[in-house]
Image (tube, grey):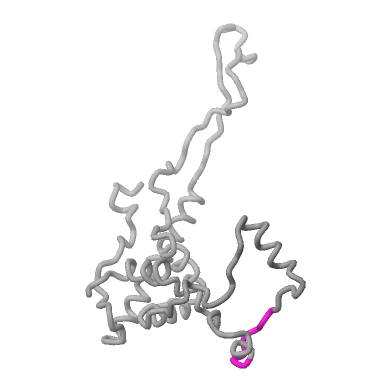
Amino acid sequence: MDIDVEALLVWTYRDQRADLYAGGAQMHPLERAADGHKVFGRSADGCAAIEDRAMLGADVDVRGRAVGGMAIDDDAEHVHGLVAALGQVSSMLMRYARTGDRPGWAADVAPIRIVPLPEQHRWPDPRQPRHPGYLYCPVVIDDNAREIAFQRAQYTAWVSGLILVAYGLRKETGRLRRWQVTDVLPPLAPWGLDGGR
C-alpha cells in the first residue's frame, strides 16, 4: 500500500506507539538487565502505586505489555529504528508524528509590529505646550525576526528528517512488508509560497 513518509511516521508513533517499545520496554526486568539496559525498581511498600493513583486519578494496571498487550508491527519497529538513528531530529519527528501535526513556520507572525503598550493610556503630551489637546500613546516595536527564524529552522529540520527517513526506506526497497513509501513530502520552504512573508 502506498503511503507518504509523514503519514508512515504518524502510523508508526501515533497508531503503533513504536517509541514505547524502545530500549527494551517490553522485556521482563531480568531480560532488560541481561540485555544491558538499566532497570529501576519501584517501592515495595506500595507508595509508588499510591503516587500513581494520586497523579493520574485512576488505578494503573502494570501487568502485561505496556501497549495494549499487542506486539508491535515489524514495519513500525523498522521505521522506529531508522528514526531513532537520526540523533537530535528524531525526538522532533516522533513528537509531531504522535500528534499528527507539523511544526509551525511563523505563517501568521509579522516580521515587525508596532504594539501600543496596553497598560499605558493616551494622555496629553507634556512636550507639546502649544497643543494641549494633542494625545499620544507609547508604543513598542516588536521585532519577531528571531522567532520567525527559529520556527523556520525547526520546520526545515523536521522536513530534512523526513527526507532522511524516506531515503533510508527507499534504499532498503522491499524491507517494509505493508507499505511502499511515495515521493510526496511537505513543502521544503512554505514561507516562499506566500510572497516571502
Position of 46 with respect to 61 (left or right) is right
Q: Main secondary structure of the magenta part?
A: loop
39 magenta-colored: yes
> In the displayed image of the protein, which residue is found farthest to the right?
45
Where is residue 50 drawn, in percent x and y?
Answer: 70, 63
Above/below status of 93 relative to 102 = below
Image quarter for residue 31? bottom right
| Span shown in magenta | 34-40
Q: Residue at 51% across / 42% down in the picture?
A: 143
Q: Residue at 44% across / 43% down in the picture?
A: 111
Q: Residue at 39% across / 72% down in the picture?
A: 12
Where is residue 109 drawn, in percent x and y?
Answer: 43, 43
Position of 15 with respect to 48 (left or right) is left
Above/below status of 52 relative to 107 = below
Where is residue 37 drawn, in percent x and y?
Answer: 62, 86
Using the image as rendered, state which of residue 76 and residue 66 is in the foreground.
66
Using the image as rendered, state which of residue 70 and residue 81 is in the foreground.
70
Using the image as rendered, state which of residue 75 and residue 189 is in the foreground.
75
Position of 147 with respect to 74 (left or right) is right
Using the image as rendered, state which of residue 186 and residue 6 is in the foreground.
6
Which quadrant of the figure contains the N terminus?
A: bottom left
189 magenta-colored: no
Above/below status of 194 relative to 78 = above
> In the displayed image of the protein, which residue is found farthest to the left?
1
Where is residue 62 drawn, in percent x and y?
Answer: 59, 72
> In the displayed image of the protein, which residue is found farthest to the bottom?
34
Q: Residue at 65% across / 83% down in the picture?
A: 38
